[in-house]
Image (spheres, helix red, strand yellow):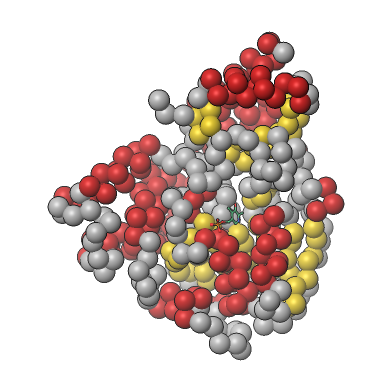
Amino acid sequence: MKKHNFSAGPCILPQSVFKEASQAVLDFNNSGLSILEISHRSKDFVAVMDEAQALVIDLLKLEGKGYKALFLQGGASTQFLMTAYNLLENKAAYLNTGTWSSKAIKEAKMFGSVEEVASSADKNFNYIPKNYSIPADADYFHCTSNNTIFGTQIKEFPTTTTPLVCDMSSDIFSRELDFSKFDIIYAGAQKNMGPAGTTLVVIKEDILGKVSRQIPSMLDYKTHISKDSMFNTPPVFAVYTSMLTLRWLKEKGGIAGIQKLNEEKAALLYAEIDRNPLFEGFAAVEDRSIMNATFNLKDEKLKDLFEDLVKAAGINGINGHRSVGGYRASMYNALPKESVQTLITVMKELETQA
Ligand SMILES: *Cc1c(COP(=O)(O)O)cnc(C)c1O
């Protein structure tokens, strides 16, 4: 039986995508060949890469605005250093909203000076700092749109003339934003787009070419732009499966369509967290993520009972990250509303049994 999968990543993808992707492993496009054994330079795979890139630009409404979509490797973690390598000449500004931001800051410091404009470390990152100012002389400003571990999400991005770089690993394609505000958006595929193994980078081409250092070919965005993400062998299966997920998303009404569903799911779960006297939310209410809801049991003695009920209901992946504890329900695009309803039923059940 299919589990209700609230895993934070790698995570649930649409069932139809699992089916289609597994079929392509056996026989891709009725070619008599597996997607895993064809050349990445074959006509059939080039068409996949082209469609995946076009869907990204289309879904983000960046058509004709000077952006390029790349499918790279090395995870979002490689983007922590690659963004700095390509953009940081003197100074960069960073907003520190959690583990991933902190890691990005650590990498950037190897390339220049880093000004941390604000941090929510004082409260174990349970909120998003506001009213900070971004130095006008920074080469770029970096932020993390959704803090997967802590369950907070930036609702309003700063308006600034400084170029904007954003790690959107865990909420890309989940809500409408003016994506043209950003100069670089990056996201590991495995949170909301596809299997682990590829990283989406959406880049405004005119942001490049401003640093004086030499950049190794594989870490230079220009290399990948000039070769359409085919400088070396791309992760063909991860790109193919991401393309299928993006097609699915487009059929669902694009980002606007899925945002409505995401907001409904999040509203249902947060309402129960707030109503149920046995639970409390972790993240500040105004900064709550619609992707990852973090919450705790007020009475630790109920832990075993709750977790038995969770297991019996076929729910997977709600344990919180070790740096927060408690629980985390990740409600990515492909998670059905019924899964959220099942979790809520279990929370109510705990209340009657406790
Ligand atoms: C998971 C995650 C990362 C790390 O991604 P990898 O692809 O594993 O390197 C970075 N940033 C955020 C916001 C994440 O959720």
In the depicted structure, whether residue 66 falls above or below residue 56:
below
Question: Looking at this view, is 186 or 76 the one in front?
Answer: 76
Q: Quadrant of ligand 1?
A: bottom right
> Visible in this render: residue 349?
yes
Question: Looking at this view, is 267 or 216 the one in front?
Answer: 216
Q: Residue at x 27, y 49 (%)?
A: 25
Q: How many marks?
A: 0
Q: Can you tell which quarter of the image residue 63 is in?
A: bottom left
> Visible in this render: residue 293?
no
Q: Residue at x 38, y 37 (%)?
A: 15
Left or right placement of residue 310 versus residue 196 in this view = right
Q: Position of residue 274 (x, y in %)?
A: 73, 26
Q: Residue at x 33, y 63 (%)?
A: 50
Q: Position of residue 227 (x, y in %)?
A: 37, 76
Quadrant location, the C terminus: top right
Left or right placement of residue 237 versus residue 134 in this view = left
In the depicted structure, whether residue 314 falls above or below residue 252:
above
Quadrant location, the N terminus: top left
Q: Can you tell which quarter of the image residue 91 is in?
A: bottom right
Q: Position of residue 95 (x, y in %)?
A: 74, 61
Q: Residue at x 14, y 52 (%)?
A: 32
Left or right placement of residue 271 versus residue 258 in this view = right
Residue occupying the far top of the picture: 352
